[in-house]
C-alpha cells in the first residue's frame, strides 16, 4: 500500500508540539510522584503542579527522547520488513522475534521486571483495541496506533518505575553522596540529600530510616561529599 505524504502546516506543528509538551509534563509529574512517595511525601503539597511537572520532565527528558527515537526506529524497521519480496518474506518474522527476545533478555538482566510487564501490557492493550468491535475502523487502521498505545501505556509505566528505582537506591544506601547540614541549633551529618520541594530541603536519614525536612531559611551551610572520596562541594 502506497503511503500518502502530507505536508504539515504551522497549525499542525503547533498542535503536535503542544501535545508533546503536555505529554512530557504528565510524565514528569508521574516520575516525581513515584520518587517522592517512596519517602512518604506528596510533592504536590509543596510545589505547584506545573513547576513540579517541568522539573520531572527535565529529569527524564533524555529517557523520553531515547524512547521516541526507538519507536521511530522500530517503524523504519517495520517499513523495511514489509518491503521484503515474497521469496524472502518467510524469514521476515525472524527480525521482530530476535528484537523482542533481545529486549526481554536485557530487561531480565537489568532486573527491570516492571518494564517487561509494561511491554506485555502494551501489547495486550494494542490487541484489545485492534480486536474490539466498538473501536472505529479508522482508529484500528491508523499507522499511529502502535505509537500512541506505547507512549500512553509503556512510557507512563517506565516513568513511574524510574522514579521509584531512583528513590529505592537512596533508601537502600546505594546513594553516591552524603550530606551535612548546618542549621542554627545543630549539625546534621551522614544524610542523603533527597531534593528540594519549594522552600524545604528533604534529607534521608539511613540510620533511622526517616525523612528529615529542613526549611531552606534555617540552613546556614549544606555540604555534599562523595562516599568514595573526601572531595566536597559546598552550597550556601
Image: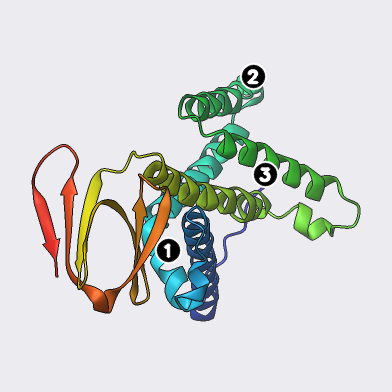
Q: Nearer the viewer, residue 56 or 149?
A: 56
Locate residue 183, reporting x and y percent. Answer: 21, 69
Q: Looking at the image, is 88 positioned above or below residue 137? A: above
Element under disc 3 = helix
Element under disc 2 = helix
Which residue is painted at 51% across and 42% down in the image?
A: 76
Pair 2/3: label in front: 3
At label 2, counting other C-alpha atoms closer than 10 Å, the crowd grade (few under 14, some 14-19, many 20 or more) is few
- CA gap, disc 1 to disc 2? 47 Å
Which residue is painted at 41% across and 57% down in the image?
A: 211
Which residue is painted at 41% across and 45% down in the image?
A: 171
Locate residue 37, reporting x and y percent. Answer: 52, 57
The disc, 1 or 3, on the residue closer to the chain's N-terminal end is 1
The disc, 1 or 2, on the residue closer to the chain's N-terminal end is 1
User: Of the numbered discs in the image, which one, if any, rests on residue 33?
Assistant: none
Q: Where does label 1 land, which residue?
A: 57
Q: Nearer the viewer, residue 212 or 231?
A: 212
- Could you tell me which quadrant the C terminus lies in? bottom left
Q: Where does label 2 land, which residue?
A: 87
Colouring method of the image: rainbow
Asked where in the image residue 175 lies, by quadrant, the reply is: top left
Q: Where does label 3 land, which residue?
A: 122
Asked whether the viewer can see residue 21, the reply is no
Asked where in the image residue 198 lies, by quadrant, the reply is: bottom left
Amino acid at each position: 500500500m502506497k503511503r500518502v505524504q502530507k505536508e504539515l502546516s504551522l497549525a499542525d506543528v503547533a498542535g503536535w508540539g503542544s501535545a508533546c509538551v503536555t505529554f512530557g509534563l504528565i510524565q514528569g509529574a508521574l516520575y516525581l510522584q513515584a520518587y517522592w512517595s517512596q519517602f512518604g511525601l506528596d510533592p504536590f503539597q509543596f510545589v505547584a503542579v506545573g513547576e513540579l511537572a517541568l522539573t520531572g520532565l527535565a529529569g527524564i527528558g533524555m529517557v523520553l527522547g531515547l524512547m521516541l527515537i526507538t519507536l521511530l526506529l522500530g517503524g523504519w524497521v517495520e517499513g523495511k520488513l514489509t518491503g521484503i519480496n515474497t521469496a524472502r518474506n518467510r524469514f521476515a518474522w525472524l527480525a521482530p522475534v530476535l528484537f523482542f527476545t533481545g529486549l526481554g533478555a536485557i530487561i531480565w538482566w537489568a532486573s527491570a521486571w516492571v518494564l517487561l510487564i509494561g511491554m506485555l501490557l502494551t501489547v495486550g492493550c494494542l490487541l484489545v483495541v485492534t480486536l474490539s468491535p466498538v473501536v472505529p475502523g479508522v482508529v484500528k487502521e491508523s499507522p499511529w496506533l502502535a505509537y500512541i498505545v506505547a507512549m500512553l501505556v509503556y512510557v507512563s509505566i517506565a516513568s513511574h518505575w524510574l522514579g521509584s528505582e531512583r528513590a529505592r537506591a537512596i533508601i537502600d544506601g546505594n546513594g553516591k553522596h552524603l550530606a551535612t547540614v548546618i542549621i542554627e541549633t545543630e549539625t546534621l551529618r551522614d544524610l542523603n540529600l533527597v531534593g528540594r520541594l519549594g522552600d524545604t530541603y528533604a534529607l534521608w536519614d539511613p540510620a533511622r530510616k526517616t525523612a528529615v525536612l529542613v526549611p531552606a531559611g534555617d540552613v546556614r551551610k549544606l555540604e555534599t561529599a562523595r562516599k568514595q572520596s573526601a572531595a566536597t562541594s559546598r552550597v550556601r
